[in-house]
Image (cartoon, rainbow, N blue to C red):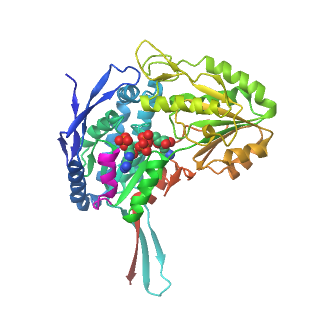
Amino acid sequence: MTQKFDNLINGTWVAGASYSPNINPSNLSDVLGDYAQASAEHLDSAVQAARAAFPAWSVSGIQARSDALDKIGTEILARREELGTLLAREEGKTLAEGIGEAARAGNIFKFFAGECLRLAGETLPSVRPGIGVEVTREPMGVVGLITPWNFPIAIPAWKIAPALAYGNCVVFKPADLVPGCAWALAEIISRSGIPAGVFNLVMGRGSVIGDPLVNHPGVDAISFTGSQGVGGRIAQQCAVNLKKVQLEMGGKNPQVILDDADLAQAVELSVQSAFFSTGQRCTASSRLIVTDAIYPRFLDAMKTRMASLKVGDAQQAGIDIGPVSSLTQLEQDLSYVQIGQDEGAVLVAGGERLARDNEGFYMAPALLTETTATMRINREEVFGPVASIIRVKGYEEALAEANNTPFGLSAGIATTSLKYATHFKRHSQAGMVMVNLPTAGVDYHVPFGGRKSSSYGSREQGKYAQEFFTTVKTAYTLS
Ligand code: NAP
């Protein structure tokens, strides 16, 4: 019989209103378990529990919080292979990518175990004699955390860890497609010594659980990662309710390849950026902007390298690229390959569904050439293993094309020129800039986020996370 996994509400495992199967995208006959679908009433109970737990937790003391976060991080790191395997099985990242992501989640908890000991304030003299001024940070209250399916353990970790570190209570709604990692993380948190109600897991659909979470009067702030469409609607709802909100959304990240680039390095980082993790990263590069003189050599080398990529079961040794995560996403990826060709692009590699021993959502990474900046494939986020090349004359045109997008998450440049690298770092309109590195692949102790339509609100990760998860108080004392 398939195992059932329940929601965690007020320290108790609570049965769902119904259950839905969690299916392995590498093998559609493999069911990881049946995961609870919460009702709106469950969501309300979770918010009430978080509200009730907040007064005590907010003044619980930083040693208790640090110890709990450290315990969670230690366990995740110790179980990284098991959790990484679960991640590969439910989301379709390769085993190496899954284990890497699990380790990242563990390190994030360890980082915030330290950060909550370092929450500094300020003491200033007043402009009025005989008065002292203190500026301190206090927790926001009850925070609702809503996460996407593509990083099923790292993104929950980088929201939950700072939320708890700074004294907030949490209601966490993971993506409906990947409840397995969320449940495993919640189970670890439930044994960390954190009091009942401080952390609650409520699984279910966005329309059933996400929407009431955003609109619940008992929730003080919403941190969301996902698509631009859903994020935009959440921002509007939070504005109406005067609720603090933080949104991390999509990207259409450029990877510039200049004539003077190291060719082998440029090809490797382009393949990495565009196709690893099946292209399902907000920081993936789907626009390869290549200058004239290197273009023929770059294209040949890309085709050769792409022919060597092994697409297959995420848990199998030697696989470079796992399956697409769902049928809906696969259909979207394939449709964009067609849209690109209908617009005049030329498909030079991949772009078709692949059959493997197991039935799964496999797709050959696609490369399109002869594309222009106005085509839909260069303006809209595909979120799959689909990249296009935009050919340009030189650096100035490359920079203009890189910035010619409504998004602004990550941007990369491959060059041996210090002058161009320095100029690009300064003039790229992205929140994160990479020189001779893939657009995806970031550290956990520094800020993460973008500009334009990619992000809204303060940055996530590193010490910058305190901007969102705390509120500032200014106190005056007559001496
Ligand atoms: P999505 O469809 O926007 O969903 C994100 C989350 O929002 C899911 O938990 C979803 O629940 C929930 N949701 C859906 N409708 C909602 C509503 N009306 N109210 C409240 N919550 C709602 O995004 P996705 O397909 O999971 O993820 C892919 C997107 O995430 C891409 O655009 C990618 O670029 C972006 N992303 C951004 C970052 C970043 O840091 N910038 C990182 C990773 C991914 P369901 O699962 O039930 O739909």
Q: Is residue 369 above or below residue 435?
A: above
Q: Is residue 267 left or right of residue 248?
A: right
**Ligand 1: quadrant of the figure:** top left
Q: Nearer the viewer, residue 341 or 210?
A: 341
Expressed as whole percent of the image width and height from the top left, the position of residue 285 reads: 60, 37
Q: Quadrant of residue 20?
A: top left
Dominant secondary-structure state across the stretch colored magenta: helix
- Residue 18 lies, with reference to residue 167, above or below; the image says above
Residue 213 on image: x %, y %: 31, 53
Q: Residue at x 27, y 44 (%)?
A: 201
Q: Is residue 215 shown in magenta? A: yes
Picture quarter containing residue 234?
bottom left
Which residue is depicted at the point 18% across and 41% down?
Answer: 14
Report if residue 115 is visible in the image. Answer: yes
Q: Residue furthest front?
A: 342
Front residue of this view, candidates 447 and 65: 447
Quadrant for the N terminus in the image:
top left
Image x and y of residue 463, in percent: 47, 54
Residue 112 on the magenta segment = no
Seen in the image, is 44 located left or right of residue 345? Answer: left
Q: Is residue 107 visible?
A: no
Q: Residue 344: horizontal and vertical position, in percent?
A: 68, 32
In magenta, the rendered stretch is 206-219
Q: Classify 164 as above or below 441.
A: below
Looking at the rendered structure, the number of numbered marks drawn on it comes to 0
Q: Residue furthest top?
A: 357
Res 58 quadrant in image: bottom left
Q: Residue at point 58% right, 19% down?
A: 309
Quarter holding the C terminus?
bottom left
